[in-house]
Every structure is written in structure tokens, then in C-alpha cells.
Image (tube, helix red, strand yellow):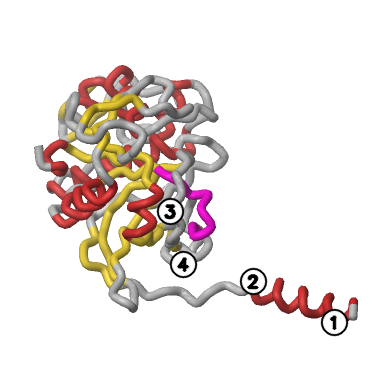
Amino acid sequence: MMKKLFYLLLIITLVACQKRPKVEFTDEVRLPMTPVKDQGHTEFCWAYAMLATIETEHIARGDSVHLSPVYIERVVRRKHLRGMGSTLLNVIGKHGIVSYDAYPDTSYHKLPRPKWVFMLGARYTPLEFAHSVCAPDEYIAVTSNEKYPYYKEVVLDLPDNWEHNRFLNIPKDSLLAHVERAIRNRHAVCWEGDTDEYGFSFEEGIADSHYCTSPTDNHCMAIIGLARDPHNRLFFTMKNSWGTANPYHGLMYMSAEYLRDKTVAVYMTREAYGE
């Protein structure tokens, strides 16, 4: 009896460990992007995702913009500073940003922090350059939390919101509709939410779950597209910052249901939101 039980558990384990075949998605919208990066062991997903959103927003307009996450790490001088998309906007609003070429990932321990940014024959300070790629108050932070009144600005009571940033609180379905409309109108969106959910798998490149539980705030990614799975279900194309070792070379596909239920906040330009 024990031997049969052992083999049964072994079979169940082997089946559970088998990877599902790669799902073939059909793009409806795919916005341009800079190369996928790897945040390594840092907790700077909020910087990588928000910078990727700003980059894609500009590239979609015809601008060539590639920004340096390592500059942000150097500015705050901590590898494990948690934050939100709003934190990145606040940091570059105070300390500026530089191009990726001026301060690439490999230069963190080798180069001093750049004092100038050279772009198209012009010279900028990091703060001037930041204002040229992200104007003050250009982005709106949006959440959906039934604990707060809807259509009001609220301060989310979250450890990562240690700056007490304010978010426009709207219903889940409205938030989902705003994100989809933004992407269809060729605006990138920064997503912040729950990746501890059972249905989230970087190895498979898919986030898909139907469990409607309150999301935790543990990761940020840039939304750069819309796609359909073989069953015609809507998925959002996410640019992650965990390297390229998955079936979609670092991208992920998040179902509309997952985004609806597992979002803590999103960030998009006010033009994208429709103001």
C-alpha cells in the first residue's frame, strides 16, 4: 500500500512539474519598446517599469528615448528601496534622469554619476532632461479600491506608499477600460500589482487567474500591447524586468481578468486617461 502511494505521489509530482506548451498569442497592438532589462536582486521594479513606460510613450510619438534605471539606484543610494510608480516620478522630478548610454547597467561601479546629458546636439542637466521626457504632473496615478470612495483622490495605506502619494480611485471595470483604451490609442501604461498569485508564472510567461482576492503590492511592469490567445481571450502584453529567460523573451501576457482583479495601481499620461 505504501509503495503504491509513493508511486502515485511521484506521478502527481512529475505531472505538476511538466511545463505547459507555449501559448501562441496574436498581437492586436504592440507598442515599440527598448530592450528588456534585468533588475537583478534589487527591488527597483518600480523604476524599471515606470521608465519603460516613459520610453515607450516617447518612442510611440517618434522620439528616441532610452533611460537609465541604474542612475535611479545611484541617486537613492540603496539597492533595496521599495517604492511605487509614483516614487520614480518623484525621484526624477527632484534629481533628474540620464540616458541609458550615459549610464548603462554595467557602469554602476565604474563611473561617477553623470552631470550632463547630450541629446541631438544639445546639453542638458539631468533635471532638465527629466523635464523634457516627463513633464511635471504629466502622469496620473489610478487605483481601484472599494475601501475608499470612488472618483476621489485617496492616499493608499500601503508600505510602498511611504511618500503618501495620491491616487484617483475608480471602479475595477472602469480602470480596465481606461487601460485598454490607452493601449489602443498607443499610450503605454505602468502596472503595479500582485504577482504572488498562483496563476502568475514568469517561466511560462503568463499571468491568468480567476481568484478574486484582494491584491498585494509586490511588482511593477510596463504594459506595451494587447493580444488574443487561441480562445480569443484578451491579454495585456507586459514588459517585465526579470531578464529574457522565458518563452516570450522577457515579455509576459496578462489576462484581462487578472489585470482587473490583481491591480493595485496604474500610471498613464493624462492624455491617455482622457483628461
Q: Disc 1 to disc 2, how far (Cα)?
A: 18 Å
Q: Is residue 95 above or below residue 33?
A: above
Kindly identify which residue carries mark 2: 16
Towards the viewer: 128 or 13: 13
Three-letter code, disc 3: Cys
- Which element carries disc 2, helix, strand or loop? helix
Q: Earlier in the sequence, mark 4 or mark 2?
A: 2
Q: Earlier in the sequence, mark 3 or mark 4?
A: 3
User: Which residues lie in the magenta part?
Assistant: 193-200
Is residue 225 visible in the rendered structure shown here?
yes
Is residue 133 visible in the rendered structure shown here?
no
Kindly identify which residue carries mark 1: 4
> Is disc 1 surrounded by few (<14), some (14 to 19) or many (20+) residues within 10 Å?
few
Residue 247 numbered mark, or none? 4
Q: Earlier in the sequence, mark 1 or mark 2?
A: 1
The N terminus, quarter of image: bottom right
Give the side of residue 63 with respect to residue 35, left or right: left
Kindly report which numbered mark, 3 or 2, lies closer to the viewer in this rendering.
3
